[in-house]
Amino acid sequence: MAADTRRILLVEDEKSIREAVSAYLEREGYWVTPAEDGQVAIEEFSAHRFDLVVLDLMLPKISGEQVCKVIRDASDVPIIMLTAKGETEDRVVGLELGADDYLVKPFSPRELVARVRALLRRAHVGVEPQRDRLVFGSLEIDVAGHKAFLDGNELDLTASEFKLLTTLSRYPGRVYSRMELVEKVLGYDYEGYERTIDSHVKNLRAKLEDDPREPTFIYTVHGVGYRFEPPKTEADA
Ligand code: CA
């Protein structure tokens, strides 16, 4: 598998659809892992990293809704729901559960491939809830203006350091793996670049923190990656 191959989890109990869709996606260069029921889907999802999930709504063992929920609780991977004609309400439920798109059966595999490509492109750019200004005690981030200030002094950050800081600080306390940070900050996924994130983090810390051994904003989560945690203020104490 090439380093930049996108991995897709395809959850569909109907063998003919599963095989046809699989063949189409593989022809487009995607790496496809098929799952024939909800349980296998969840097992596969917990065991591997996927770039996108194609998820049938009506599934044996564990329903597509349930699978969607489980995946959403753990990840913001793009999900395309497959629904049968007339399942309008279920479709709405799917989107409410956090699916990003849906296709009504019968659909053409070509249409699915187009949706997959579009969603992966969007995910690549990174659709995050946007806030223009983030303030954490002495640290202030002007997202729109691409500037960050510590104690009122503007920090001299590179584009990658700035992206790293905004990515981490949007969800304080959330742990990001190096791989996720590579994708979100550098915009590509290739395992060799995980170390690049470490050096960006190191440089960012040097600008943010007095003593890197005693972090005040960016914490290392051993074996996983990093998380942002604003310093406790007196109001929290
Ligand atoms: Ca089905």
Image: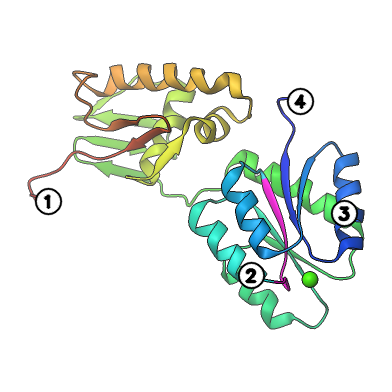
Q: Are marks 3 and 2 in contact (CB under 8 Å)?
A: no
Dot 4 or dot 1, earlier in sequence: 4
3D distance between C-alphas at marks 1 and 3: 52 Å
Foreground pick, 156 / 128 = 128
Residue 109 marker: none
Magenta region: which residues?
A: 52-60
x then y, percent, for residue 12 = 78, 62
Dot 2 or dot 1, earlier in sequence: 2
- Residue 197 falls left or right of residue 97: left
* Secondary structure at numbered mark 4: loop
Which of the 4 image quadrants contains residue 233? top left
x then y, percent, for residue 113 = 84, 50
Q: Determine which residue is flagged by label 3.
A: 21
Does residue 77 show up? no
Magenta-drawn stretch contains 50: no
* Secondary structure at numbered mark 1: loop
x then y, percent, for residue 46 = 57, 49
